[in-house]
Amino acid sequence: MKAAVFHGPGQPLTIEQVDIDEPKEREVVVRTVASGVCHSDLHFVDGLYMWPTPAVLGHEAAGVVEKVGSQVSYLKPGDHVIACLSVFCGYCEDCMSGHPNLCSNKAATQRGASDKPRLSQKGKMVNQFADLSGYAEKMLLHENALVKIADDVPLDRAALIGCGVMTGVGAALNTAKVAPGSTVAVFGAGGVGLAIIQGARIAGARMIIAVDKFPAKLDLAKKLGATHAVDASKGDAVDQIRELTGGGVEYSFEAIGLKVAAEQAYQSLTAGGIATIVGMVPLGQKVDVDGFSLLFEKRIQGCFMGSNRFRIDMPRIIELYQQGRLDLDDMITRRGKLEDVNEAFRAMKAGEVARTVLMFE
Amino acid sequence: MKAAVFHGPKMPLSIEDVELDKPQDREVLIKTVASGVCHSDLHFVDGFYPYPAPAVLGHEAAGIIEEVGKQVTYVKPGDHVICCLSVFCGYCEQCMSGHPNRCSNKAATQRNPADKPRISQKGKPVFQFLDISSYCEKMLLHENAVVKIREDFPLDRAALIGCGVTTGVGAVLNTAKIEPGSTVAVFGAGGVGLAAIQGARIAGARKIIAIDMFEGKLAMAKRLGATDTVDASSSDPVDEIRKLTGGGVDYSFEAIGLKKVAEQAFNALKAGGTATVIGMIPVGQKVELDGYMFLTERKLQGSNMGSNRFRIDMPKYIDFYLQGRLNLDDMISRRGKLEDVNDAFRAMKAGEVARTVLMFN
């Protein structure tokens, strides 16, 4: 099958033939229908995070189950599914305490190092990315990396839910638990930031301030629920937020992965406020928090994949979409083919798109 | 009347005569019976936090009401009270949302700069410290800075509840809201740290790790509820905590006020864990957090005075003491007179004492 292969940081992905094994036990083969191009992939391509090579990237996908292993009970061929990198064992302490996104026993869902690899090229192992590898015509996954969805949900929009939408909506609803009537600032109006803005709107925030440097992204943010927009290229974002709110917001979100934006998110808080870091701050970088300000009971907290319990959350997100309360249509800026993946990265860096979705035949 | 007066950083307090005004409107005049010597006073004497001089320091006290202003309804002469620096207006947004410790309208409880000052010397104003100034034979406060307590409760132990105990126990019960069965690390086994350890014991933590550089303080920590101790003078506390817990704690507390220790408290967490900074980190210092650690949903939050609603919390702590569940007797290392305040600071710096309490006749 065709896949986009990563050979090391700073190099474009190349389209190559990759072999995929048969599903064992609790594994499932999924025919990929749509795969979103998410910023986190770019972090690895840019070398800000490490991943062994060669690897097939991509981790935001939806498709149709083709074949299941002998012990799979949750799915059958023909089922429509969303894949999620928060594969969970279901029995570790984190899974059992309601945090399957922090599963500490993922090895239980993976093949052993001595087993035949899931992906290979001419007999040599190709690394699976985030237990998914969505930039490929097919995916071989543990069944606990999948949620079944209704057949009438469009799979391109379903793909978005697989990572960016889950991460953003979940950061607002699960991690920060935004309260009705509260004030919110979102740094970064890309795919994840727009999902946070929509999550804040769904939760009933009264003021939702979008912060970005691209006017077009701020316009889209307003369309999706932001009540105010702050152009960070025109003056200090923290000052502008303080002015709009009369002192600071109750909730702020960092949705870019920049040290400076994380610090600004914290600085924008009112007393007792919570800053949630959703973006991936590059390895080795420190986020500085003013010690004195902690006396005002401010909090800075991490968020991983929207603190999801994805088999619970994703069907809810689909319902919100079907009710017209969550706009996914406008979040897909472009559609492309697998071959367009490098161009999608370029467009993302240039701030041209919220999301490109790669469509498979 | 006699008071210990602060004339600027790095100078010993001097015992001098000061005058207190009559109580106006909602003010009360209190005969000070006991005043604890708390680390926060030392921060100002050492110059880590600025305060205008001359001022009467001291903010952890209990006493007996002597006189009340004409609009006071909550207390009457003869009532026993604990003072708390978390004086609250009762009607700002913070007060009305259950966070009177973050009252944003304290001016409503203070005298105007144009009014006669509460404390003076030969007609010149002396600054009141944190709306209390308890290193003094009497205190003139707003009634919303006191809680009435039962008359059979010893006032030296009541004084401790006024700041250190409420701060430590409250950080655990109110700010962090730890769960029964959780794992806890407390950095610093001084007055506040020992109170946090007891709070963790009361809340049912299964592992309570005390970290300090003084053996005597670690022994006291064990006596008050720590299940394990780490001597930070001879080992890396983060490594030791990881070893003891198999990966990190659910909750950590910084009870000293050191940047480096706040960072250790964050690094000692397991995925999803919460670090609560109680200590006052010197003004201008930054706590540096590894950006990628937010991907495992770690949290860092400040706590101010144990997130107290002190009129609700302090009577609870008194009940805990009377039931034998909160040990205050062992937390008073020494008793002294007002004149001993500078020696109490010295003994605190030397790690000789959890608390000195100054007793007034």
Image (tube, coloured by chain):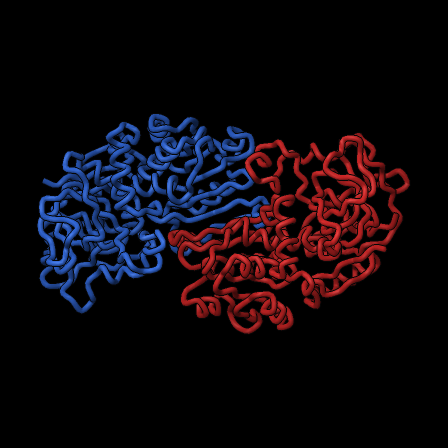
Which percent across, then down, holds residue A313?
A: 61, 48
Which percent across, then down, holds residue A236?
A: 51, 69
Residue at point 56%, 62% (across, down): A187
Say if residue B230 shows up in the picture.
Answer: no
Nearest the camera: B215 or A345? Answer: A345
What colour is chain A?
Answer: red
Q: Which chain is blue?
A: B
Q: Is residue B65 above or below residue B241?
A: below
Say if residue B23 shows up in the picture.
Answer: yes
Residue A100 relative to residue B226: left or right: right
Residue at point 15%, 39% (across, down): B359
Residue A360 relative to residue B206: left or right: right
Residue B169 occupies quadrant? top left
Which percent across, then down, holds residue B97?
A: 36, 54
Q: Is residue B150 above or below residue A183?
A: above
Residue B343 relative to residue A150: left or right: left
Q: Residue furthest right?
A: A122
